[in-house]
Image (cartoon, coloured by chain):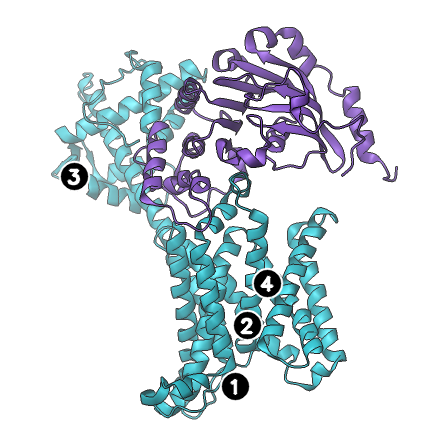
Chain colours: A purple, B cyan
Amino acid sequence: MVMPHHGERPRSLETFPEHSPESPLSIHDMTVAYDRRPVLWDIEYEAPTGGRLIAIVGPNGAGKSTLIKACLGLLPTASGLIEIYGEPYRKQRSIVGYVPQRETVDWDFPVSALDVVCMGRYGLIGWCRPVSRRHREAARECLAKVGLSGLESRQIRRLSGGQQQRVFLARALAQEAHLYFMDEPFAGVDAATERAIVDVLRDLRDLGRTVICVHHDLQNVPEYFDEVILLNMRVVASGPVRETFTEENLLKTYGGRLTLLDEAANALARRGEPG
Amino acid sequence: MNSTFFIQYDVPALAAATCAAVSCALLGNFLLLRRLSLMGDAISHAVLPGIVVAFLLVGSRATLPVVAGAAIAGVVVTVAVEFLCRLGRVDPGASMGVAFSVLFALGVVLLEQTAASHIDLDADCVLYGQLEDIAWLGPEGWGDAFSWGHLQNLPREVLTLVSVGIVVVLFITIFFKELRITSFDPDLASTLGFRPGWMHYAMMILVSIAVVASFEAVGSIQVIAMLICPPATARLLTDRLHVQLWLSVACAVLSSVGGYMVAAHVPALVVGPGTPSLDAAGTMTVTSGVLLGLTIVFSPWHGLVARHVRRFMTAVRIEREDLLAMLYRLEEVHSAGDGETPRDMSKVQIIEALRGDRGGPGLAIRVALRGALRRGEIMGASGRFGLTEAGRRRAQGIIRMHRLWEHYLVHELGLRPDHVHRTAMALEHVTSRAMQDELETAGGEVATDPHDRPIPDPVPGDERPS
C-alpha cells in the first residue's frame, strides 16, 4: 500500500516546537487507507495533558473507528507518526485500554461476564500464566464499579445489550490503563447503562486518565465531554467543546455529502483499475 | 473374549482411535468457536499433497517427514484461504471449499503419478484409515503388557498418536488464556500484545499434525467428524469453555469406544455369530453423529425438548396470571353493584374464557388451574372457583401492571385507547423489574386507566425479578 508522500518524514515528534511529550496522544501527519482508498488524510492532533474526556464526532464513514484502530496498531498507517505519552504505541501497550464496538465479538462464546472482564488483566498477567485469584478479585471489583455485581457467572449472551456494554467497560477498567480508546460505548444502551458509563468515565477523568470515545449522539456531547475532535476524513476542528463544538464547525463536518476529498479518494482507489 | 487377542488387536486399535479422537476434538473446540470448523475439513484434505511430497523427498513413510509435510501443507492451505478471501474477494466458505478440493486433487494426482502408488498409501486408506491393521505383536496377557520390551514394540501409529495427544493437551493447557482471548476478541488480544495471527497459525499447524497423525489410523472421514461432532455436542451442554473442553473429550472417548464396541459386537448380535465385524472408523463416526443428534434433542438447556418444556411452563404461568386477572375483573363487576354477575366461575367457563378464540385442547389452562389451586390462589366450592385473599393480592399486582401499561401506551406512545388491551395483555406477563420502575414513574400517580377503570394500589412484596 503506497501513498503519495510529500516532503521528508520527521523521525520524531520532538522536532515540533509545540509538541509536548506528556501529551497522552499526539498524531502527526497520519494517513490511513483501506484497499488503497484513503479514509483518513493527514491527521494532526494532540490531546491535552491531564484527565480529559474526548469525543470523536463525525458522520458515517468519516473514519472515526479507523482513527482509533490506527492509533492502536490494529490497522496499518500509510504514513505518519503516533505517540502515546511521548513513546510509540508498541512501547506503551500496557497503559492503553480499548473498548471495541459491541458487535465485533461473538456473544454466544462460552464465557461468563467475569471471564470477559478477566481478559482485561491478561496483559498484566503475561503469556502462558493462568489468571490468579488476585487478578480475578480485581476483575470482580471492576464489575462492581459498573453495577454488575451478582452477574459474574452469567453467560454473556444472557446479559442485556446495556449490560454487555458495561462488561466491556469493566474489562477496560481492569486493564488499569492511562489512555482509553472506546468505540461507541453509548451505542444502543438503556438509560441506566448510560448513567453508569458516564459515572465511570468521570471517575477515570478525576483520576487523571484520558478517555477518547467515538460518539454518535451530538446532543449530549457538551454534557458528557470536555474536548471534541470533529472528524470527516480529516480533522475539521479539535479542542475544548465550548470553543470547538460550534454550529459552523458542525456544518463543515457534516455538510456536503460528496466533498472533493471524497472524490479524490475514489480516484486514488481506482488507479490502475478498468473503467 | 480371548485376552491375548484383546491386547494385541483391540487395545492398540482403541488406543489409537481414542487418542486421535481426543486430539481432534480438543482442537475442534477452537475451530468451532472461531466458526472455522470447515477449516478442519479443508486441512484434513489439503495435507495429502504435503504427505506425498514428503514421501517423494524422503522415500519412506517415516513419521517426522510426513508430519512436517502435513504441517507445511496446513500452513499453505491456511494462507491460500486467506489469500482467496482477501485478494480474490471470495466468500470464506467458498475459499475453503476451493482451496481444499484443489489441494486434495493435487495430492491424488501426485499419488497416482509417482512411486507412492506402489505402496500402501492410497486415497482409500486416507479416507477410511486402517484401524484393523494396527497390531501389537508381543504381549500374551495383561501381566507382561507393561514390560519395557513390549512397550517398545507398540505399533508406530499408537506411539505417534499418543505423542500428538500429549502435544495437543500441553498446547491447550499452556495457551488456554491466549486461545480464549484470540478466539473471542482478536482485536483486544492484539492490543494487549497477544498475537492473534501467531495463535491462528499455531492452531492450524497443530490441526494439520493431529489430522495427519490420525488419518493413517482412522481415516479422514472420522477425523472431520471428530473435529466437529464432539465440540458441537459439548457446546450444547455447557456455557463454560473449560467444561466444554472436558465434555468434548468425554464425547470423543465415548464415540471411539462405543463405536468400536458397535463394530465388534453388533453384527454378531443382529445377524448371528460369525458375521464379520463392521468398519470401526465408520461406526465411531456414526456414533459421534448420533451423540450430537441426541444432544440437540435432549440437551438440558439448548435442547429441543427442554425448549418445549420451558415454553409450556411459560404458557402455564401466563394462563395462571390471566386466570387470576379474569377473576379479579369479575369481582370488580360484581362489587360495582351488578347483582347478577357472580364472583366465581365454573371450570368449563374458565377454560372457555381463557381459551378465547384460540381453540386447542387447553392443556396449559388445565395445568394452570390446578397450579393456582395448589398455590392457594383460588378455591373451589361446589364446582365453582373464586379468588382467595392471596390470589386477590397476586391478581391486584397483575391488573395494576396491565392498567399501567394501558396508560403508558395511550398517554406516552399515543396509541388509541381501544387498541391497547391486547398489547397490555401480552406485556403484563413479561414486565421486568426495570420496565416496572419506568412504568411507575410514567403513571404511578394516575388513578385510572384509559378506560376509566381504577388502577389498583401497588401490592407490597409483589416485586418482579430483575
Q: Which residue is mark 1?
A: B133
How many angstroms separate mark 1 from mark 2 (CA)?
Answer: 15 Å
Q: Which residue is mark 4?
A: B41
Q: Residue furthest right?
A: A275
Residue B267 in percent (x, y) is at 44, 84
Subunit of mark 1? B
Q: Which residue is mark 3?
A: B375
Residue under the point 38% across and 60% down: B247
Q: Amino acid at mark 4?
A: Asp
Residue under the point 34% across and 45% down: A132
How many angstroms separate mark 4 from mark 3 (CA)?
Answer: 55 Å
Answer above or below: position of A92 versus B126: above
Foreground: disc 2 or disc 4: 2
Foreground: disc 1 or disc 2: 2
Foreground: disc 3 or disc 2: 2
Which of the pair A232/B332 is nearer the observer? A232
Q: Amino acid at mark 1?
A: Asp
Foreground: disc 4 or disc 3: 4
Foreground: disc 1 or disc 4: 1
